[in-house]
Image (cartoon, rainbow, N blue to C red):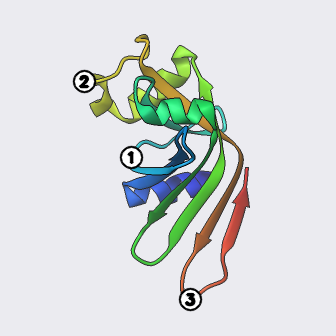
Amino acid sequence: MNEICEFIKKCGTYYLATVDADGQARVRPFGTINIFEDKLYIQTGKVKNVSKQIQANPKVELCCFNGQEWLRLAGELVRDDRIEAKEAMLESYPNLKAMYSASDDNTEVLYFKNAVATISSFTAAPKVVKF
């Protein structure tokens, strides 16, 4: 999981796919990734459509590319409303503190469960990591 987190961090931006209520796939850029208590977390706001889509269907996939290899991470996202989890994310991304607070009703952190990450390239066999 640490290798997966570092790969995503080095890419800077990853793209998260969800499904809306009509079954339409929705993809948007994200930039937050953090390990807290041996779980891989992302962050968003509860007022956003992406949050509503995740709560309705927690199965997501993210994808990022470092110029030579790409990573796809599929799994389910689970909301963690604990202040400690939110604080850990905000400490890792202090620029978010201008928009979010660990104690507000909007900040949302979610961790992956049943995750399968695949690192691929055009020149090597895919590497699969499950957590």
What residue is drawn where x is 58% and y is 56%?
A: 4
The image shows residue 102 at horizontal and vertical percentages of: 43, 16
Q: Mark 3 points at which residue?
A: 123
Q: Name the residue under label 1.
A: 31
Direction from residue 100 to residue 119 in the image, left or right: right
**Residue 30 in view, yes or no:** yes
Disc 3 residue type (three-letter) = Thr
Provide the secondary structure element on which disc 2 rests. Answer: helix
What residue is drawn where x is 44% and y is 54%?
A: 15
Specify which label sits upstream in the sequence, 2 or 1.
Answer: 1
Identify the residue at the far front of this view.
22
Figure quadrant of residue 54:
top right
What residue is drawn where x is 73% and y is 49%?
A: 131
Figure quadrant of residue 95:
top left
Residue 31's place in the image compared with 128, above or below, is above
The image shows residue 27 at horizontal and vertical percentages of: 44, 52
Figure quadrant of residue 130:
bottom right
Few, some or many residues within 10 Å of mark 2 (<14, 14–19, 20+): few
Residue 44's place in the image compared with 129, above or below, is above
Question: For this rendering, which residue is in front, 24 or 12?
Answer: 24
The image shows residue 93 at horizontal and vertical percentages of: 36, 35
Disc 1 residue type (three-letter) = Gly
Provide the secondary structure element on which disc 1 rests. Answer: loop
Provide the secondary structure element on which disc 3 rests. Answer: loop
Few, some or many residues within 10 Å of mark 3 (<14, 14–19, 20+): few
**Residue 36 in view, yes or no:** no
Mark linked to residue 98: 2
